[in-house]
Image (cartoon, coloured by chain):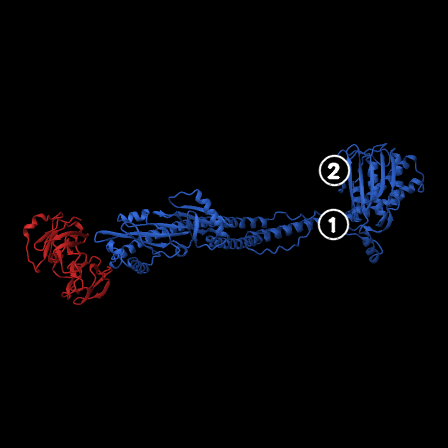
Chain colours: A red, B blue
């Protein structure tokens, strides 16, 4: 899918599309959208050829195919929720496929583990200098995977030291109250405790935040967040 | 009288031949030497100049290359995720914990790999994040400079940074990640003595780096040469212009250096970096000078050889000529036997043969003439001797008849008899003269030498001629130095010689004239002078009067008594006088002016006569035949 628009996706018309699926007795949802800039959209821009694909893999799949399955452009979460105390969710998976990190942007809950799989025919490396979690898993070949558990919330930049174009961002949120930003810039966070909350949205171009009043039942609509 | 040997010519043929054969060779050698020296030196100069220009070009290319290399290394580093990942961290996270320490560690790792003494990193606003220079060496912060501004505009640039006496070649690279500028990286290397040494190895020139005209590093060791060079460079800088390179010959400590001065191209911070390439022309021309010296040596050897060859050729050519010249010279003094020793078969050999034949012919001719002369002298001697006897008889009978011993004679008859007596006297004198002359000719004068007072001889002569002098109304004076003893004189012959000269004076001096007889000691001997106021002798006749049987023009018989004026007789008198004087080892000469008078001087040497006398007394007691 090609995300052809460079402008804003208005969130105003989306209020009619409310879907209520309350999992808690008194819980609301936050629904909103962000204006995606060109820097944000560029992460899945397939018009720019990947310098590595094609040289190494003879696979017929293209970079466009890889982009088609990865439609995350950002992460939105409730920033003032307390840290999750229960057992961590099952390990999340991040692939290195077609010389890309898939997904390009991954959201996990603090304490959750991520398994890094190498699915390419070449060696890859994964490392990060980010303060929430610095690590270097070294280089390993296809079929191997190594795991990292992220305890502190924050954003972690992940690189492969072999392929300078590869980049992933892992957003470690304090709780499960988060949602993904889609190609149109829309996001939805469910199961939010009613009250006043700070909502943060991480995008490649930077973080944005907004304060919302979440009703006990129903949806809090967030006006479109501009950069 | 034999002619003397001629002196040898001052400029010999051999010298001329030697000169003409060796001079062209010498000239060619000198010209060749000069030409080679000049051309090789000029070529050397051109070569050194070209070498220096190439060295400068090479250095500048090296600088360009180094700039490009630093850019390449910078680009590679800037694209390395392990490097740029630090710079992509959100600003909010840089304040947390150990961001700067981690970045410094990462930078240090990359700096080591890049092998760059300077490794500076700024953020995307040009704010310095980490300094990778050697502590205490590189402290200049170029974050506000043009180079950094260029890099912030995403251009990769190279340039030079000067800090005090240190110069650095730097490249600044923008760090772009995913299309975003996240910072700049500055890489630098020292432009120092190590580089100068490396450059010297490849260019064979001494290398000097200068910052604003001051020497910062150099391959020339610290010395007086270098301190002088500093002054030269300062002076040179004042007239310098930025673009291009300049060549100049720098005389330093008596050595000539060809110096090329240039300045680097590219942006510069903190000063101007210049370079100087130096090469000693004198050291470069050592080989040329050695070749020149070899040529000189070879030339000198060739010149000596040429001269020797010339002399050899000249000697070979002129040896026969010299022999011929010597032989001819010997012929002049009567030696016809000088060996020629010319055996060559060329023209010289032919000439020698012809000379030999000519010499033989002349010799036989001379001998034949000599034989004839001897026969003539013998005949005269015999004839004159034989004539005396009948003349004596005629004289005796004429005398007796004149005295009346043979009967009465008339006065007329007596006069006739007196004339006969005079005629026989003349005949007797003539016969005696002829005898003497032939004896002189054959060197057979029977002289008896003994010590004798020449003054007395002269006085005797004065007595003898006195009657003739008075007959002619002439005045006679005599001046004799006392004690003129000559150790070796035949008194009779010397008397005859002086008498002949004196009678000559009487005869050719008009009546009433005067005659002076002097004898005195002179340098090396005794001189007898006979001075008259006679008619004189013409210049051209002065030598001839001593020849035999000479007849001068305008002689007329003129008598005013027994001694006829201006009469010559047979003309043997002076000739005999000379023969006698020469038999004494002396000489006779005349000084005369027509109409004024004549002076005859007889010189008798006394030196060398003592030894001759000693020999004479030891070997011979009687008459002696003198060989002249």
C-alpha span from label 2 to label 1: 27 Å
The total number of labels drawn is 2
Evaluate if marks 2 and 1 touch, with contact meaning CB atoms under 8 Å apart.
no
Q: Are marks 2 and 1 on the same chain?
A: yes
Residue under the image location 38 percent in, 43 percent down: B242
Q: Chain of mark 1?
A: B
Q: Residues within 10 Å of mark 2 (few under 14, many from 20)?
A: few
Taking depth in this image into account, of B621 and A105 the one nearest to the observer is A105
Taking depth in this image into account, of A131 and B478 the one nearest to the observer is A131
Percent x, y for residue A88?
Answer: 15, 65
Percent x, y for residue A56?
Answer: 17, 61
Left or right of A47? Residue B121 is right
Answer whether residue A99 is visible to the viewer in this image.
Answer: no
Q: Which residue is mark 1?
A: B374
Q: Which residue is mark 2?
A: B541
Task: Find numbered disc 2 in the image and state the secondary structure of the residue it sits on.
Answer: helix
Q: Chain of mark 2?
A: B
Q: Residues within 10 Å of mark 1 (few under 14, many from 20)?
A: some
Q: Earlier in the sequence, mark 2 or mark 1?
A: 1
Percent x, y for residue A143?
Answer: 16, 67
Taking depth in this image into account, of B385 and B342 the one nearest to the observer is B342
Rendered view: A210 above or below A102 = above
Task: Find numbered disc 1 in the image and state the secondary structure of the residue it sits on.
Answer: helix
């Amino acid at each position: 899918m090609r995300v052809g628009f460079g402008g804003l996706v208005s969130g105003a018309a989306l209020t009619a599309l409310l879907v209520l699926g309350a999992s808690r007795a008194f819980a609301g949802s936050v629904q909103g959208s962000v204006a995606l800039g060109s820097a944000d959209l560029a992460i899945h821009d397939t018009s720019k050829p990947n310098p590595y694909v094609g040289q190494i893999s003879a696979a017929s799949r293209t970079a466009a195919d890889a982009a088609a399955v990865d439609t995350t452009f950002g992460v939105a979460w409730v920033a003032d929720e307390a840290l999750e105390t229960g057992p961590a969710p099952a390990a999340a998976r991040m692939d290195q496929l077609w010389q890309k990190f898939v997904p390009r942007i991954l959201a996990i809950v603090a304490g959750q583990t991520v398994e890094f799989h190498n699915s390419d025919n070449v060696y890859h490396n994964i490392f990060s200098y980010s303060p929430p979690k610095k690590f270097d898993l070294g280089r390993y070949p296809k079929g191997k995977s190594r795991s990292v558990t992220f305890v502190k919330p924050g954003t972690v930049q992940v690189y492969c030291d072999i392929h300078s174009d590869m980049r992933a961002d892992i957003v470690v949120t304090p709780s499960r109250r988060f949602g993904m930003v889609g190609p149109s810039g829309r996001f939805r966070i469910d199961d939010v405790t009613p009250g006043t909350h700070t909502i943060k949205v991480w995008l490649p171009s930077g973080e944005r935040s907004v304060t919302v009043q979440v009703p006990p039942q129903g949806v809090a609509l967030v006006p479109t967040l501009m950069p | 009288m034999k002619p003397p040997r001629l002196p040898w010519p001052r400029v010999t043929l051999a010298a001329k031949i030697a000169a003409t054969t060796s001079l062209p060779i010498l000239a060619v050698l000198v010209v060749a030497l000069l030409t080679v020296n000049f051309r090789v030196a000029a070529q050397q100069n051109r070569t050194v100049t070209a070498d220096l220009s190439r060295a400068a070009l090479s250095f500048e290319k090296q600088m360009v290359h180094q700039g490009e290399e630093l850019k390449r290394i910078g680009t590679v580093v800037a694209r390395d995720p392990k490097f740029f990942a630090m710079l992509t961290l959100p600003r909010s996270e840089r304040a947390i914990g150990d961001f700067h320490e981690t970045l410094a560690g990462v930078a240090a790792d990359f700096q080591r790999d890049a092998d760059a003494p300077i490794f500076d990193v700024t953020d995307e606003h040009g704010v310095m994040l980490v300094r990778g220079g050697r502590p205490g060496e590189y402290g200049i912060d170029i974050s506000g400079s043009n180079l950094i501004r260029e890099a912030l505009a995403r251009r990769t640039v190279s340039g030079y940074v000067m800090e005090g006496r240190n110069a650095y070649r730097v490249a600044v690279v923008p760090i772009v990640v995913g299309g975003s500028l996240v910072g700049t990286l500055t890489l630098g290397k020292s432009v120092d003595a190590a580089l100068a040494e490396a450059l010297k190895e490849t260019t064979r020139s001494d290398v000097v780096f200068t910052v604003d005209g001051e020497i910062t590093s150099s391959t020339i060791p610290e010395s007086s040469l270098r301190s002088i060079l500093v002054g030269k460079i300062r002076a040179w800088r004042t007239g310098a212009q930025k673009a291009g390179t300049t060549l100049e010959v720098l005389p330093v400590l008596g050595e000539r250096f060809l110096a090329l001065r240039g300045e680097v191209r590219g942006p510069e911070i903190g000063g101007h970096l210049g370079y100087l390439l130096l090469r000693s022309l004198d050291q470069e021309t050592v080989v040329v000078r050695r070749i020149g010296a070899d040529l000189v040596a070879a030339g000198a050897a060739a010149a000596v050889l040429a001269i020797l060859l010339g002399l050899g050729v000249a000697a070979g050519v002129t040896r026969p000529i010299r022999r011929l010249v010597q032989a001819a010279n010997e012929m002049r003094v009567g030696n016809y036997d000088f060996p020629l020793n010319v055996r060559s078969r060329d023209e010289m050999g032919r000439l020698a043969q012809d000379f030999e034949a000519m010499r033989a012919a002349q010799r036989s001719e001379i001998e034949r003439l000599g034989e004839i002369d001897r026969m003539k002298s013998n005949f005269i001697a015999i004839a004159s001797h034989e004539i005396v006897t009948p003349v004596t008889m005629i004289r005796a009978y004429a005398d007796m008849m004149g005295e009346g011993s043979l009967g009465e004679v008339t006065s007329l008859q007596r006069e006739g008899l007196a004339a006969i007596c005079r005629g026989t006297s003349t005949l007797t004198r003539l016969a005696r003269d002829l005898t003497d002359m032939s004896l002189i000719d054959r060197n057979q004068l029977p002289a008896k030498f003994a010590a004798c007072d020449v003054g007395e001889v002269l006085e005797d002569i004065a007595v003898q001629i006195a009657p003739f002098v008075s007959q002619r109304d002439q005045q006679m004076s005599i001046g004799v130095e006392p004690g003129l003893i000559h150790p070796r004189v035949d008194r009779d012959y010397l008397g005859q010689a002086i008498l002949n000269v004196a009678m000559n004076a009487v005869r050719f001096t008009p009546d009433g004239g005067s005659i002076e007889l002097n004898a005195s000691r002179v340098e090396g001997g005794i001189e007898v002078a006979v001075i008259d106021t006679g008619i004189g002798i013409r210049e051209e006749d002065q030598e001839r009067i001593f020849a035999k049987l000479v007849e001068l023009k305008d002689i007329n018989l003129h008598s005013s008594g027994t001694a006829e004026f201006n009469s010559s007789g047979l003309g043997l008198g002076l000739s005999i006088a000379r023969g006698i004087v020469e038999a004494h080892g002396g000489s006779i000469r005349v000084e005369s002016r027509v109409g004024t008078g004549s002076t005859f001087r007889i010189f008798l040497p006394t030196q060398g006569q003592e030894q001759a006398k000693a020999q004479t007394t030891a070997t011979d007691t009687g008459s002696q035949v003198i060989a002249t």
